[in-house]
Image (cartoon, helix red, strand yellow):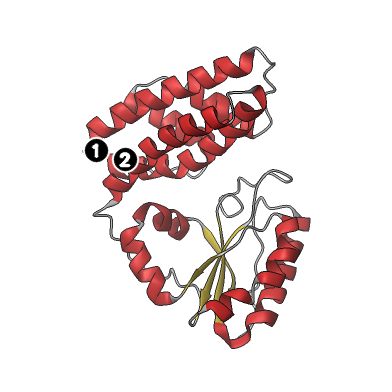
Amino acid sequence: MAPVDWSIDGLPEGTQKLLKSYVKDVTKVYGNEIESIILYGSAAREEFLPGLSNLNVLLILSSYDLSVLKQYDGLHKRWSKEQVVVPLFLTRADLESASTAFPLEYQDILDWHRLLWGHDPFVGLKIDTRYLAAEVVQGLRGNVFRLRQRLVEGRSTEEAITILLPLSITTLLPVLRGLQRLLGRPVTKHGEPLLHDIESHLEIDMTGLRDALALKRGHISPGQKEIPRLMDRYLDCLTRLVGIAEARIT
């Protein structure tokens, strides 16, 4: 199969060269077993932050078992150092069933992905959104519950809060895009316009979430006294958002 000729807007040239080397390594290891290599996440949405963002990849295989998965061991050892996280391993049949069970995640990938190699399995794929509302509610509430748990686990230290806020807002943004879909809003791929749209449409102050996103992007550096206040604002905003969103979509 001929390689795909691609260039990705907003992605540093060095990162694009790195991805092309990754594709060569993956196709060399998997040969005829690999059908597609898909890039998704921040790198595909033009929100990649060098040194901060991971590279998220989906591998479509003809089939897999333990031996096939184990072939990735060497690749992981090499490429995890370059921020390439362990891929999603799916067959085409898996993708079709997953698009029904996980409409939030796979609609996001369908909307913003780049084909790095092979055939694009998302062409013509229909996402079943019957369970989207339930997944959005679960994503919102799950974020709150996990954040509370990890705060206690990290003893609510400045270091723990500085780590947890970027992690929380990162997992929250796809959920908010799902919320936009349920509200009939135009879906926004970039974080800041997304928060602004939700804030305006639901008439809720999203300052706490915007601060967390600014922290994630390295735009602010709160001092020791301000970090706990930032977390308080974030938790308060997120808790109110959950209540308002649930009332609108359930």
Q: Residue 187 occupies which quadrant of the picture?
A: top left
Vertical order, 232 against 124 (above or below): above
Vertical order, 208 against 5 (above or below): above
Task: Provide the residue designation for mark 1.
Answer: 249
Residue plotted at (44% across, 53% down): 108
Q: What is the number of callouts on the image?
A: 2
User: Helix or strand or loop: what does disc 2 sit on?
Assistant: helix
Identity of the amino acid at label 2? Answer: Val
Task: Return the x and y of residue 232 as percentages of the image width and height.
Answer: 50, 18
State the residue in front, 120 or 235.
235
First reached walking from the N terminus: tag 2 or tag 1? 2
Q: Residues within 10 Å of mark 1 (few under 14, many from 20)?
A: some
Q: Residue furthest right?
A: 14
Task: Provide the residue designation for mark 2.
Answer: 137
The CA distance from mark 2 to mark 1 is: 9 Å
In the rendered image, is residue 245 in sight?
Answer: yes
Task: Return the x and y of residue 23 as percentages of the image width and height.
Answer: 68, 72
Tag 2 and tag 1, C-beta contact below 8 Å: yes
Q: Residues within 10 Å of mark 2 (few under 14, many from 20)?
A: many
Vertical order, 139 against 98 (above or below): above
State the residue in front, 9 or 116.
116
Q: Residue furthest top?
A: 225
